[in-house]
Image (spheres, grey):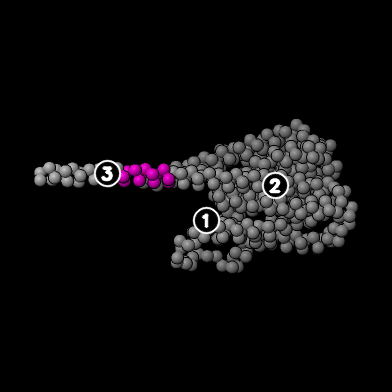
């Protein structure tokens, strides 16, 4: 009898030990599973970012080169060159609806059983004002870029365009409360000098064979367009913060699509009002590479710009608008190198120095973004652990 009680007591003492061991084993397995899920999410995240970066670099480079090819082989219409930068925006619609209907968004929507109406939702007229005003600026920027591509060699055009990063930082200082750190100031100075150096080039370095006057016009138009891009990015960020008050995928895509719609309408009006539409048929017939190549050139230029747009929107959604712009500028060295091969642009000493300074300025700018991101992560981690 005593032995039976001792045996039962031993069993009762062993059971908690087994249960504790089982709980620890389950906890360990759950931890391994969570780490595996986090690793998979990180891999998918970095894969998506890499894809978007590739879309930006490929889209921007091919669109710029195809735009220059249009002028090189007989194209003359600046409004047509403007239109193809904008008119391909319907390509974004399938991407927009596909992402919205993906599991990521449907699961988020399913978790919200109660629909809350945000009292801060902007009115229709306020949204329309934002879309129309920024759309008009986009149309102007694309028109100025068309002038730049017409009168400047591609390599010079691209190097001058890199100044958009400096303009973005400058406008962000006034509109988005950006702090001008030593790295940002260094970037501004280097990018400004990089663009200013190109004003001292000889006419012989200009593969377009236009006059010095036309070269200066092209330079100023490209510089103005770069300033316009910096203004657009800062105004867009301001609109998201003050008016839309949301940076979800839906809001970013709607902003992109409606702005493009407004800008496309402006370009169409300009094409017909300027009378350039009447010369398109003749331009097509006289195109050096033939009618089919003329159509394909314009078509793929439009597609390339929208591929670039998808990459930009993707990076804005996954990372930030500043990172998206920085990646866009990072593709700057690609086009001049390709232009030397395709259009026999001359890569003289001034251009090489300008490129080095621009890359240096870009690295300085990105390094500041890295410092800001690291600081933000540390602060969030401290808040999470209850230190702050």
In the image, taking residue 207 as reference, residue 90 lies left or right, namely left
Badges 1 and 2: C-beta atoms under 8 Å apart? no
Distance between mark 3 and mark 1 Cα atoms: 40 Å
Earlier along the polypeptide chain: callout 1 or callout 2? 2
Q: Earlier in the sequence, mark 3 or mark 2?
A: 3
Q: Is 146 left, or right, of 98 in this rendering? A: right
Q: Main secondary structure of the magenta part?
A: helix
Residue under circle 1?
A: 104
The C terminus sits in image quarter: top left
Q: Residues within 10 Å of mark 3 (few under 14, many from 20)?
A: few
Mark-to-mark CA distance, 3 and 2: 63 Å
Q: Quadrant of residue 83?
A: bottom right
Secondary structure, mark 2, is helix
Q: Secondary structure at mark 1?
A: helix
Residue with the mark numbered 3: 18
- Circle 1 packing at 10 Å, graded few (<14), some (14-19), many (20+), is few
Residue depth check, mark 3 versus mark 2: number of the one nearer the observer: 3
Real-space Cα separation, disc 1 to disc 2, in angstroms: 29 Å
* Residue at 60% in and 60% down: 97
Seen at 10% across and 44% down, the residue is: 2
Q: Nearer the viewer, residue 316 or 226?
A: 316
Other-residue count near label 2 (Cα within 10 Å), few / some / many at <14 / 14–19 / ≥20: many
Q: Position of residue 312 (x, y in %)?
A: 63, 50
Q: Position of residue 79 (x, y in %)?
A: 79, 56
Over which residues does the magenta segment extend?
Answer: 22-34
Dot 3 or dot 1: first in sequence order is 3
Q: Quadrant of residue 84?
A: bottom right
- Residue located beneath label 2 in the image: 60
Mark 1 or 2, which is nearer the eye? 1
């Amino acid at each position: 009898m005593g032995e039976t009680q001792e045996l039962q007591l031993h069993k009762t003492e062993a059971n908690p030990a087994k249960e504790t061991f089982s709980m620890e084993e389950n906890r360990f397995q759950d931890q391994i599973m969570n780490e595996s899920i986090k690793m998979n999410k990180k891999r998918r995240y970095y894969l998506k970012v890499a894809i978007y970066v590739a879309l930006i670099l490929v889209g921007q480079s091919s669109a710029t080169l195809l735009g220059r090819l249009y002028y090189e082989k007989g194209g003359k219409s600046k409004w047509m060159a403007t239109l193809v930068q904008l008119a391909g925006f319907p390509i974004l619609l399938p991407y927009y609806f596909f992402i919205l209907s993906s599991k990521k968004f449907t699961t988020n929507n399913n978790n919200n059983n109660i629909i809350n109406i945000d009292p801060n939702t902007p009115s229709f007229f306020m949204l329309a004002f934002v879309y129309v005003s920024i759309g008009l600026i986009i149309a102007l920027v694309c028109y100025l870029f068309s002038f730049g591509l017409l009168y400047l060699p591609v390599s010079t055009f691209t190097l001058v365009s890199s100044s958009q990063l400096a303009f973005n930082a400058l406008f962000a200082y006034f509109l988005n409360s950006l702090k001008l750190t030593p790295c940002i100031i260094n970037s501004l100075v280097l990018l400004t000098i990089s663009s200013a150096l190109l004003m001292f080039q000889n006419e012989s370095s200009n593969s377009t064979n236009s006059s010095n006057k036309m070269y200066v016009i092209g330079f100023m138009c490209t510089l103005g367009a770069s300033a316009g891009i910096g203004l657009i990015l800062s105004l867009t960020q301001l609109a998201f913060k003050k008016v839309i008050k949301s940076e979800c995928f839906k809001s970013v895509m709607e902003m992109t699509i409606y702005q493009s719609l407004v800008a496309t309408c402006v370009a169409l009006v300009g094409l017909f009002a300027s009378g350039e539409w009447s010369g398109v048929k003749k331009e097509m017939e006289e195109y050096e590479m033939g009618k089919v190549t003329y159509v394909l050139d314009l078509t793929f230029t439009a597609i390339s710009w929208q591929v670039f747009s998808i990459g930009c929107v993707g990076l804005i959604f996954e990372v930030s608008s500043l990172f998206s712009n920085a990646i866009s500028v990072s593709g700057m060295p690609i086009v001049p190198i390709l232009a030397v091969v395709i259009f026999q642009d001359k890569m003289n000493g001034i251009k090489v120095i300008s490129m080095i300074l621009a890359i240096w300025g870009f690295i300085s700018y990105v390094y500041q973004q890295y410092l800001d991101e690291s600081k933000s992560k540390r602060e969030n981690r401290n808040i999470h652990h209850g230190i702050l």
